[in-house]
Image (spheres, rainbow, N blue to C red):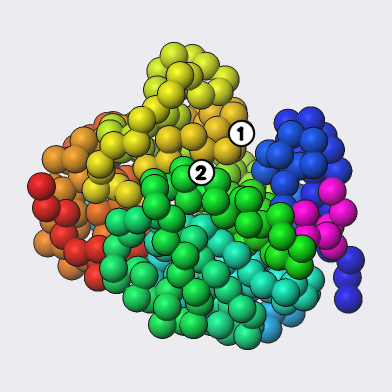
Amino acid sequence: MTPLPDRCCPADGTRVPGGSLDWCCPVCRGPLDLLFAPTPAPLTSLTGRVNSLWRYAECLPLAAPTVSLGEGRTPLVELHGGISAKLDFLMPTLSFKDRGAVLLAELALRLGPRQVLADSSGNAGTAIAAYCARAALPCTVYVPEGTSPKKLEQIEAHGARVHVVDGDREATARAAREAADSPGTFYASHVFNPYFLHGTKTYVHELWEDLGGRLPDVIVVPVGNGTLLLGAALAVTELHRAGLIDRRPALYAVQAAAVAPLAHAWAEGAQELVGVTPMAPTFAEGIAIPRPPRARQILRTVRAFGGTFLTVTEDQIQHAQRDLAARGLYVESTGAACWAAVREGVLRGRTAVVPLCGAGVKTGLARG
């Protein structure tokens, strides 16, 4: 079996062996990146390959999957005015998190831990639970109080143990990280583990294939912990470096105005978070992250890709969710945030793609 690539800390350069269960930098306790720079296959060589994200095998750090549920290759449909939507809510567990979860489960299977542990406000937890079930790995998911009952039901249905934390999303993450240091534990963190980013990057590889070897002017993504945005940047870099695209699209990051620490830092011209962002109620619960661990990386990436941050109000989220439903697309309120940000002409005629990240049946209509 091919050795696993090492990981490194983007903050201080500390190197971590690829085959260890270490989940963070031993020096600063920050998230890790993967020392992996693949070359994607040209468009013509993709014909006849498996119809899942594993068709981009050259770009994935793991090969020959055993836990796949057929994830990936979601439809791309036009919305209006040069803006299209990628329907990632049609994944096996009904959210885009399957892209990264399958890589984490595949990695855990290779490392053989005693248990798998994850923390989530819902979608990442359901995805990890499903793929751990597929891999026959024992799994515990830490969730904050107030998590959607439908998401809790889905996690438990896959056989995972739910550990409800008395507190918000930040408190849940702290509790999970403490437990993650237990011997024999694989921390399936969609934030700290870089394999998750190499799963989410397939979103852009699919866009490139769907659009006949090109990308839109703007890729718009919701940002809480930034896993889709950072994955998108990886894919764009791979395609551009290989000469498969001649320009890099701008990356636009969307946050709910109620909890927008990154957008605030951006407005201040800062390189990292500024001050303390309190947790506040928002329909976009999936991106309500007051202190994202990869904040510095996210801000640097948006700058490097000529992008910006957009914020949306609760009213805008509600209206966008209903507007999408009226177009036949029933998504959860977090998944409507990107459409809320761009549907009224902010892109000024440029082509763009927004992700519809989670199915509406997970949370229902936003009501306020």
Question: In the displayed structure, does residue 293 sit left or right of residue 18?
Answer: left
> SS at mark 2?
loop
The disc at residue 260 is none
Residue under the point 42% across and 78% down: 156
> SS at mark 1?
helix
Q: Which of 280/67 is in front? A: 280
Residue 365: percent from left, percent from top: 16, 60
Q: Which of 181/72 is in front? A: 181
Q: Give, as a three-letter code, the residue at label 1.
A: Gln
Q: Crowding at label 1, few (<14), some or many (≥20) Cα neighbours within 10 Å?
A: some
Q: Which of 77/103 is in front? A: 103
Q: Which residues are magenta?
A: 16-22
Q: Give, as a three-letter code, the residue at label 2.
A: Gly
Q: Circle 2 is placed at which residue position? A: 226
Q: Circle 1 is placed at which residue position? A: 297
Dots 2, 1 in contact, CB < 8 A: yes
Whether residue 27 is situated above or below residue 270 in the rendered picture: below
Whether residue 102 is situated above or below residue 158 in the rendered picture: above
| Nearest to N terminus: mark 2 or mark 1 | 2
State the separation of the CA atoms marked 2 and 1: 9 Å
Residue under the point 49% across and 61% down: 142
Q: Crowding at label 2, few (<14), some or many (≥20) Cα neighbours within 10 Å?
A: many
Residue 7: percent from left, percent from top: 80, 49
Q: Quadrant of the N terminus?
A: bottom right
Where residue 252 sits, quadrant-wise, is: top left
